[in-house]
Amino acid sequence: PAGTDLNIGVIAAVQNETLAKELAAGEVDELLDLLDEQEDDEADVIVLSVEAPGVDDALEAMKLAVDTCVSNSGIPLAFATNDEGLMEVALRRYPGRAGIITDEVTDPVVLQVALRYGAVLIDR
């Protein structure tokens, strides 16, 4: 119903050094633990961000993170990024209608990516 507060969970590599290191190494143990925490906290949506110092290949990290989240949780995802390439990769892999949280909501390229995948744009 209108006015209902959402319980928004955040999984961000920039806020979790262990997660950043594991994603950079192609590992997901910390991500799985964080997903379990979000399940326990009854999150309505998870905001996922893989960009962080030490994550040199953010595209591969995003692929791994999205695949892991989709395979291990039914909680809807929103992706926090200003990088159009990461948006594209995340939305292409995500089987549902995702949100994109970005500073670039009026950028024509961002609008085109969101439209192509039916994503909801959310201004930071």
Image (cartoon, rainbow, N blue to C red):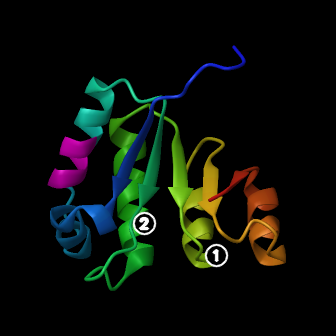
Few, some or many residues within 10 Å of mark 2 (<14, 14–19, 20+): many
Magenta segment range?
29-34
The prevailing secondary structure element of the residues shown in magenta is helix
**Front-most of 115 and 12?**
12
Q: Is residue 78 left or right of residue 24?
A: right
- In the displayed structure, would residue 79 be above or below residue 14? above
Instruction: Name the kind of residue labelled 2 in the image.
Output: Met
Q: What percent of the width, then of the height, locates residue 66?
A: 43, 54
Residue name at image x 31 percent, y 28 percent: 39
Residue name at image x 23 percent, y 61 percent: 16
Circle 1 is placed at which residue position? Answer: 84
Q: What percent of the width, then of the height, locates residue 21?
A: 18, 72
Circle 2 is placed at which residue position? Answer: 62
Per the image, label 2 sits on a secondary structure element best described as helix
- The tag earlier along the polypeptide, 1 or 2, is 2
Does residue 119 belong to the magenta stretch?
Answer: no
- In the displayed structure, would residue 38 be above or below residue 88? above
Q: What percent of the width, then of the height, locates residue 5?
A: 56, 24
- In the displayed structure, would residue 119 be above or below residue 44? below
Quarter-of-image position of residue 86: bottom right
